[in-house]
Image: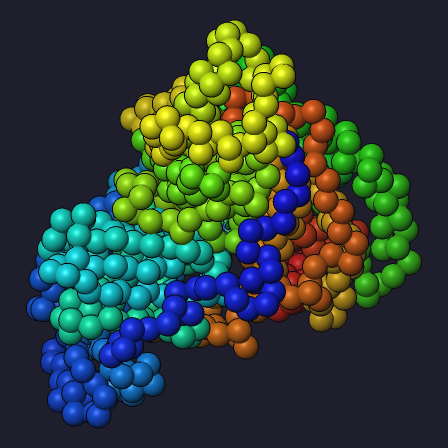
Amino acid sequence: MASSLAHNSILHHVTGKSVYVNDIPLPEGSLHAFPFYSSIPHGRIVSINCHEARKLKGVHSIMNYTEIPGVNQMGPVVHDEVCLAEDYVEFVGQVIALIAADSREIAIKASLLIDIEYEEMESVVLVKRAIEKGVMLKPARKMETGNIEEGLKGSALQLEGEFYSNGQEHWYLETQTALCIPLEGKEMKVFSSTQHPSETQAIVAEVLGIPRHLIEVEVKRMGGAFGGKETQANHIAAWTALLARKTGKPVKMHLDRDTDQIITGKRHAFYSEYKVGFDEEGMLQALDVKLHSNGGAALDLSMAIMERALFHMDNAYYIPNLKVLGHAWKTNQPPNTAFRGFGGPQSIALIENIIDRIARQLNIDSSEIRRRNFYSSGEKNITHYDQKLGKNPLAAIYEEIMETAEYKKRRKGINDFNSQNKWKKRGMSLVPVKFGISFTTSFLNQAGALVHIYQDGSVMVNHGGTEMGQGLHTKMRQVAADTFGISAEKVLISATNTSKVPNTSATAASSGTDLNGKAVENACLTLKKRLEDAFIEKFELHHSEEIIFENNHISAGRARMSFADLVMHSYLQQVSLSSTGYYRTPDIQFDREKGKGTPFYYFAYGMSISEVELDVFTGKHELLRTDILHDVGESINPLIDKGQIEGAFVQGLGWVTTEELRYDEKGHLLTHSPDTYKIPTLDDIPKDFRVAFTKDTANPNNIKRSKAVGEPPFVHGLSVWLALKDAISAVYDHQKEPRLDIPATHEAIVLCLEAMKLTN
Ligand code: MTE
Ligand code: HPA
Ligand code: MOS
């Protein structure tokens, strides 16, 4: 039953009582850790002297890689990333030594007393330089359909160009943190703010050189993650565990904002080159693309992210001849990592920019060019990697949102406004999204759960997913409560713990609810069957009789019992009241060599329309209105889903407008705190914000007929950037193409207008 059950932690969040790692009371004698990291982008460590630092009162330990008992590695997919630098450093922020002290202040002070000498080497910070240098993290990836040469040759019109989108800092409110408590022997308990407890367990075990069963990782919740804690929370946990092992004391590391922003990886910046062929009607014929991402100094998830970028090169459009190459370049930046959308937004921004150019060149409204190219039916409903879309709702969503947002009427209004105003211009744009749901690394699509019913009828659900604010635990509570027909208050979701549910995948790829929901449901169904059997036996019913679990009661005809009574009865009958549950996504496969298959279980769709007003002198703008129509299948929790859509949109809008990562030529991040790195605030959200769900788009085979919602609506933020392009273009009466990369900061907009003065 869909219900907007309030988020599990809502009262605790607003009263400040929710427990994050940093709120856990520390055992007597606990130490505080701080990392000492490289201040240069690339070089050899000539000498390092910790003498003065060690002398500081309150410092307990300073360690480097030579004291790691296990392997000096923390690469998540490929072991190409050292846990602590050895002879060389490869980015500003690379951790070289670890300090444990009585307080964080003392540890920081000690880090300033470490004397290090480097021999600097040539460095590459930005992706364009990396292409010149030519060092890739892995060989390029390709996806191809049709015949690109013939497609381009046969196209009446062609455009070519380049495009750049910058990275993005995650800006989770809770910075990276871990608390490690050494227990008996080599056992250790790790409280971590991680999206991936099983991998955190694995990496901690590896650096300590012990089997995984000695490490228990627990995650009550994260204060936001957004992909930034899919792999890189492992780092903090590994460093903390090393100090805890060495000192034999509980150790906590909680990064301050600036350090977090300097040393952790971010969304990948992408530079792209493209050639597109189309006809006079604006129909796409051929698209030839080279994507280049700034991977940073180690692989991390760069190839999976590039792969998702290749999968989303089409966004919502049928392109008969498509060739896309993806290169992840090695640079002297912290390894870049997962961030909401996982490469999807980067390639979607590119294709949307291309469509925008085509529309301007043909002088046809861009929403119309989009509509014409949507996937539809037959062969025009098959992606470049050969997945059939089945019944796709693009046309229906388009019609509905154009109507409800009064696009045509408002377009006239905008044209009138622009002809009457010289220094203020308005712009509007529609953007669709089609987002593939499943981990593209197919085996990751599995999940487990462990459900206990206690004798009083209260239920404890453990599952492998982690809560980061997205409401996963609330939805899992609904799944369990609905399966047993009991009220949600009777169900508690435990902290995620590797000793309860092992070998889990990261809570990522928007699939937390899909995967864990089915695992929880399966565990509950097993238990329900056992309760049913006990009920049948007690009342001597026929097995064919329908047994109803509803309103905290079980009934069949006149036989009726409360859930709690049946549980107690079953216990006395020696029925097991605990069960695991497991789920793996069926029917998906992908051949990486061929670049063909059915990698996604299904797609989530949506569209948005944004309207802006631009001040031509300053580049400042107001977001007048945004309409979003988004497909969440049959919503499990409409309020949570609406919150996810709004939040994702605003995060997307930040990426495309105000958030700017700027580096000096030495690779120092210049924007590493909120005074220079501007995330969206209340003032930046739409003045008029309308979010609606598509109707009749139930997703029959998924948990409760729902669809994943975490990442897809991030793409709606692009409508703001394209609306800005539209407003800029109005300055020259839509006769000139603005080159507006991402992010379109005020400064970038002014520079774009300046550049347009010089073109014809
Ligand atoms: N919502 C909140 N409040 N905080 C987050 O960190 N992460 C996003 C999204 N929504 C995030 C969020 C990302 S990147 C993903 S992949 C999904 O949530 C993960 O959770 P889910 O799979 O349960 O949707
Ligand atoms: N999304 C998020 N994380 C991932 C993925 C994905 O598709 N594949 C591997 N890790
Ligand atoms: Mo989300 S980027 O898959 O953690």
Please say if 229 is above or below 85: above
- How far from the left and from the top, in percent, is residue 551? 63, 32
**Residue 486 placement (x, y as % from top left):** 57, 35
**Front-most of 571 and 412?**
571
- Residue 186 in the image: above or below residue 583: below
Residue 160 visible to the viewer: no
Any part of residue 641 in sight: yes
Q: Residue at x 41, y 56 (%)?
A: 220
In the depicted structure, whether residue 232 falls above or below residue 346: below
The quadrant of the picture occupied by the N terminus is: top right
Q: Is residue 119 left or right of residue 263?
A: left
Frontmost residue, 621 versus 58: 58
Q: Residue at x 29, y 26 (%)?
A: 593
Q: Percent x, y for residue 670?
A: 44, 74
Hey, which quadrant is residue 190 in on the image?
Answer: bottom left
Q: Indicate the quadrant where residue 44 lies.
A: bottom left
Which residue does the image show at 69% across and 24% down from the upper left?
A: 696
633 w.r.t. 671: above or below: above
Q: In front here: 608 or 447?
A: 447
Compared across the picture, whether 578 is left or right of 556 comes to: left
In this view, the residue in front, 498 or 390, is: 498
Residue 365 coordinates in the image, percent (x, y): 76, 38
Horizontal side of 462 relative to 618 (left or right) equals: left
Q: How many marks?
A: 0
Q: Quadrant of residue 189?
A: bottom left
Applied colour scheme: rainbow
Question: Which residue is painted at 77% across and 31% down in the image?
Answer: 400
